[in-house]
Image (spheres, coloured by chain):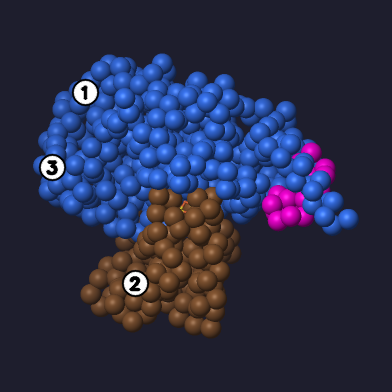
Chain colours: A brown, B blue
Amino acid sequence: MAFSPENRGRARTIVARYPQSRSAILPLAHLAQDQDGWLSDEAMQEIAELTGVTAAQVQGTCSFYTMFKRDPVGKYLVSVCTNVTCLVLGGPELLEEMRHRYDADPDVTVEEVECLAACDGAPCMQVNYDYHELLTPDAAAEVVDEYKSGKRRARTVSGTAVVGGGRA
Amino acid sequence: MPITETRIVTKRLRDRPDDSWTIEGALASGAYDVLRTALTMTPEAIQDEQVKASGLRGRGGAGFATATKWSFLPKDSFPRYLVINADEGEPSTFKDHMLIERDPHQLLEGIAIASFAVQCNLAFVYLRGEFALGYDRLTAAIDEARNRGFLGNNILGSGFDLDIIVHRGAGAYICGEETALLESLEGQRGMPRIRPPFPAVAGLYAKPTVVNNVETVSTLPHILRMGGEEYGKLGVNKSTGTRIFSLSGLVNRPGNYEVELGVTFRQLIDDLGGGVRNGGKVKFMIPGGASSQWLTGSDEHLDCPLDMDAVGQFGVMLGSGAVMVYDDTVDPVLVAWRLAKFFAHESCGKCTPCREGTGWIEKVLYRMSHGLGRADDLDMLLDVGDNISPGLNAPFSQTTICPLGPSAVSAVVSLNKYFRDEILARVATATEVSA
Ligand SMILES: Cc1cc2nc3c(=O)[nH]c(=O)nc-3n(C[C@H](O)[C@H](O)[C@H](O)COP(=O)(O)O)c2cc1C
Ligand code: SF4
Ligand code: FES
């Protein structure tokens, strides 16, 4: 989807901050994901216009980065670490269990990620980039269910804090 | 006597667990006092009498002398940029994550001092995209600092201007490599650049650029507060001061510990980390993050001091300050495979030996760690590794543009060095069983 008028204003402010507009591609892709929950072709087209490059260049850049989702994902992105500390403290088992539990749930996307820089809290995961540490599979599922029931407030799928009714 | 921490860079966040990241908490514990003094000095005095005299070396991985790096900036070439490397993605390193979330004002004060010293008016913080709370805290801290005159125009009446842009990454370990980081900051794929030119000469937007790590810059206020020479008395040999070590793995108390350089691995693991879980023994450790070669639990290795140069005698580096500890319940081949998977995933693909080699290393280690190893697998891995890092030495040589490729070989070399017999015996047993 294209940016809302409000977000287009935000986008222009971001572009203006940088000595070269092209630098705004990553921040604008995050902004698009804040709005849409993923990074669509239309959004990349508009980012291209705002930063003065071609849509192919925006796509070339964005496809390099794992946080940019070029297909829709669930409202809750559960990122489980299996790198070398989590590996020996239950990370792979946690990943398996979460994949299994939320397999049929369209609101939840479970992904395997590299070290989250929270290894003293292994095994750990992020939900929309908020940390949850020292988990058992049951504790992790409880956390996800609390997001789903609204007991916990989730960030956007790009990790931006949501304040009041909308984006921070 | 068991050792204790020497808390300098971690002092505020340990002393004030409830408000260290707020402007009130920071000001109540002396934040920005040093900046006021710094702005009355000359940039040269800060560079020479403070930073150079302190012996400060980069905490990001390479351990390069900070003052020397700054001195490479060409004279009279402006604008120039300071870029803070806050992309912390080296496996099992979690110190910058803590410093950003829990003491953003210390980082900002350090950035202001560094910017004044290298005469830059626009600084960037390239922040790992996954650090969502870190982004909130850092941007809030910038707003508060600006409101109080510590950032922005005419800082504290000195005539010095500084603006800071926090730029979120988006999930790519390679963007921690400084030239890939600059590419990414310019809106490109994060692929390392061929050097020369070095960033000091042509970095961001082809302008002179200094890239420094979060911990490096967070140390600056303390160097100026204590005096460079005094700070330089801490530590050992050419490893001056303190460093934060991220201790993880199978120890009783994993965590970040700030110690004077020169204490030993054993002291870090036993005195601060509470030793190996369940009364076990260290089988192997990975110092310096995933890119370093490994150490074992031998007395010689455990009693080696945390000295950036002395550890080189065993082919390892202190790198990003990670120390991962494994006991004999852990299969070293499995750990090596997971690291290989990481490097294969994170290789940017620009150089053939790395792009292809990391994939092969991952595949072969997978079968070795899953009971399907073959007798000549280890030698084949060494051969693949030799194409990436000819000679398989430490410090390494490389056929690649950046050190990620050679880093992927470190685990293979370590397996061969310390576990060759164990691995070959295992293959022999498996073959017998299947025959
Ligand atoms: C593959 C790779 C990843 C790196 N990741 C980081 C990182 O996440 N953070 C960091 O500060 N330095 C990282 N470095 C080191 C940087 O290239 C650079 O040396 C450092 O940021 C310089 O800062 P310093 O001199 O203050 O240490 C990495 C290097 C390589 C080769
Ligand atoms: S060594 Fe690997 S990560 Fe580094 S530039 Fe070459 S392909 Fe990219
Ligand atoms: S290994 Fe999982 S957070 Fe570092």
Q: Amino acid at mark 1?
A: Met
Query: Quick check: A61 left or right of B114?
Result: right
**Up-down: is B180 above or below A25?**
above
Q: Nearer the viewer, residue B107 or B268?
A: B268
Label 1's element?
helix
Residue at 21% x, 23% y is: B226
Q: Which residue is mark 1?
A: B226
Q: Which residue is mark 2?
A: A154
Residue B95 visible here: no
Residue at 32% x, 28% y is: B3
Q: Chain of mark 2?
A: A
Image quadrant occupied by the N terminus of chain A: bottom left
Q: Amino acid at mark 2?
A: Ala
Disc 1/disc 3 C-alpha distance (Å): 18 Å
**Up-down: is A145 above or below B28?**
below
Q: Chain of mark 3?
A: B
The verdict on residue B118 being magenta is no
How far across and down, in percent of the image, does residue B172 sit?
52, 53
Q: Which residue is mark 3?
A: B27
The verdict on residue B372 being magenta is yes
Residue at 52% x, 71% y is: A97
For label 3, being within 8 Å of ligand 1 is answered: no
Q: Which residues are magenta?
A: B365-379
**Up-down: is A86 above or below B208?**
below
How far across and down, in percent of the image, does residue B289 sit?
51, 40
How far across and down, in percent of the image, does residue A28 sit?
41, 63
